[in-house]
Image (cartoon, rainbow, N blue to C red):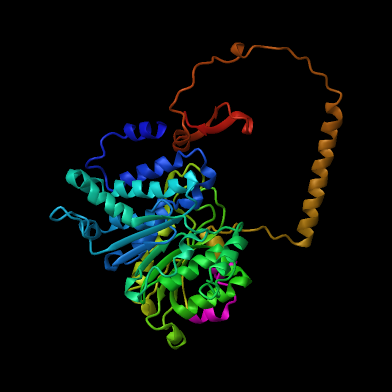
Amino acid sequence: KDTIEKYAKFGDLKNIEKGFKTKLFETFLKQSKDKSKLGQFFTPRKVVKGIVEMADVDKAQFICDPFCGVGDFVLEPFQTSQALKNKFIPKNNKINPNVKLLGYDTGREDNDEQKRTIILAKANMLIYLSDLVEKNPSLNKEFSKIINETFHFLSDSNLGTLKETERFEKDDDKPDLILTNPPYITSGVAIIRKQIEEDGLTDYYKNSGKGVEGFCLKWIIKNLKRKGQAFVILPDSIFNVFANEVLRDEIKKCCYINCIISLPAKTFFNTPKKTYILGITKKDCDDDEYENYKQDFPIFTYLVSNIGETLDVNRFEIPENDLDNAKNLFNQFKGSPNNFQTDDPRCKIQNIEKFETEKYWIIDKWWNKEEKINLGIEEESDNLTIDEFKDQIEKTKKELGELEWITDNSKKILYKTKLIPVTEIFDTEKGKAKYTKKYIHDHKGEFPVYSSQTSELGEIGSINT
């Protein structure tokens, strides 16, 4: 009921600003009572938008997110490509787009929370297509069919998408664009690995490294069409764990690496994990010919510190957006990788040889300390000489000695106390609803604002009036 009332407050959704409906959907998700699990199935829209705008959506014939959550990667292309949206306009009372969209999500049939995610994905698609649905009220069944053919809830096996190893019989059947944020969990990995063995899929997932995200990436590589592109959000463990070296070798063997973009910590809701965007292109050859196809162009790397919103639970809009800059530069880079140049200090074009000689691919370490300090990524540390350090110690000892006098004398001081009602000190009145977190964020100042919260002595911020 609360959710429906929130939607109703937005009023009529006809002829509104492009992208507002999806912002509304994101607002709804943020109202979830259990935000602790939100990051597991929800990728911030600014990240989704940035990745989709880096991909060649208009050229794609089959867009897939094998670990789709609420479906944003499958659906955001509707916002960036009017040509794609036009393909879903009904003709002769039929909807026959010559492009395929596909999203998988995994769970148990008896788990309502897991099933809810795919329901949200379908609701999300309905929002994206709402203008077409409104113009064609007699074609509800056709639109329902399209939506149900797009999103699938896989509950037959604990492996979910990882079980779908024979879904695409021929290379032409495979997706030519995969956009995804696969799960990265540490619990339950042994169960999944055992299930893979029992299902006879050990060879299929050979060289997958450590962790569920390794299996997911191997699935992506094997099911991506020749010359197809993938943009995958991955945790740092893929790039800096020794056990994943075989997986990194597998990436180089089967694909060309287009980009690695470093995202800031806390990019995802309640998830402090450090993550990266990996962009790859599948080599155009048979499996036994991979070694004959060597990458002959450099790799785009970029350090992102801001994504256009605060990296806390409030997610306030901010003007700083390094990801937007990264997207613009990458789109220039992919036109002519060998000739691309930039003076953006957050961007470095790395030779493929660096990925051959470096044991780990944590690109942040390829900027030195001075470069990071200039970018505001690393605080400048105070280096002291031995004599300066001694002076600091002596100063601290002196200050501690002064504190001893205060401590000793405080025991001798007696205070007279008196109980006084709060009403004799303050004029109390009912709080104003306007003092929300957003209001406080937008009107920062010196006057404290208090609430009934038990932390920080009740202070929730300071405003300028």
Question: From the image, which quarter does the N terminus lie in?
Answer: top left
On the image, which quarter does residue 409 sit in?
top right
Q: Is residue 242 magenta?
A: no
Residue placed at 45% from the left, 86% from the top?
288
- Does any portion of residue 370 appear in the rendered image? no
Q: Residue 131 versus residue 458: which sits nearer the camera? A: 131
**Is 451 situated above or below 38?**
above
Please state the extent of the stretch shown in magenta in the rendering.
352-370
Give percent across and percent down for residue 103: 38, 58
Name the residue located 54 percent from the left edge and 45 percent from the top edge.
36
Place of residue 127 in the rendered image (x, y in percent of width and height, measured from the top left):
30, 46
Q: Nearer the viewer, residue 223 or 191?
A: 191
Q: Is residue 362 magenta?
A: yes
The one nearer the camera, 357 or 55, is 55
Relative height, residue 267 to residue 438 (above, below): below
Residue, x 39% and y 71% (percent of image)? Answer: 224
Residue 169 x %, y %: 37, 73
Position of residue 187 relative to residue 452, above or below, is below
Most common secondary structure along the magenta stretch? helix
